[in-house]
Amino acid sequence: MAPFLSTFVGGTVGLLTGMYAIALRGRTVLKPHASYLVFTGVGGYIGFKYYRFKQFEGQLIEKRRVVLLEKRAKRQEEAATAAAAAAANGN
């Protein structure tokens, strides 16, 4: 998900949450437009942080995949060497 999209979704959710909270209370803490702006800004910030977290998580997964592939290649190489040594000793 692109950073714009996650920020937009977060901002929209923040705005809707703010509207719902204001509707429940019947009044705003700040002026209505300022409250909506604060909720939208916080939602956008949370959406952007979620995007950054997913990017970081993807990097960790990729690093782990590379390590596992290297270990597998090493095991296969050791197995091939052991099989060649066993074949040489057996003949």
Image (tube, grey):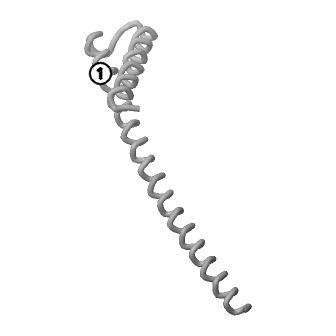
Question: Is 29 placed above or below 65 here?
Answer: above
Residue visible at 41% across and 15% down? 16
The foreground one among 37 and 66 is 66
Residue visible at 34% across and 21% down? 39
The foreground one among 10 and 3 is 3
Residue 8's image quarter? top left
Image spot of residue 45 (x, y percent): 32, 31
Identity, as a three-letter code, of the amino acid under mark 1: Val
The foreground one among 66 and 82 is 82
Q: Which residue is mark 1?
A: 38
Image quadrant holding the N terminus, namely: top left
Residue 83's image quarter? bottom right
Image spot of residue 27 (x, y percent): 36, 8
The foreground one among 43 and 81 is 81
Question: Is 48 placed above or below 91 here?
Answer: above
Residue visible at 50% across and 57% down? 65
Tell me the crowding category of disc 1: few under 14, some 14 to 19, or many 20 or more residues within 10 angstroms, Cα based. some
Image spot of residue 62 (x, y percent): 46, 53
Q: Residue furthest front?
A: 91
Element assignment for label 1: helix
Residue visible at 57% across and 75% down? 77
Residue 50's image quarter? top left
Image quadrant holding the C terminus, namely: bottom right
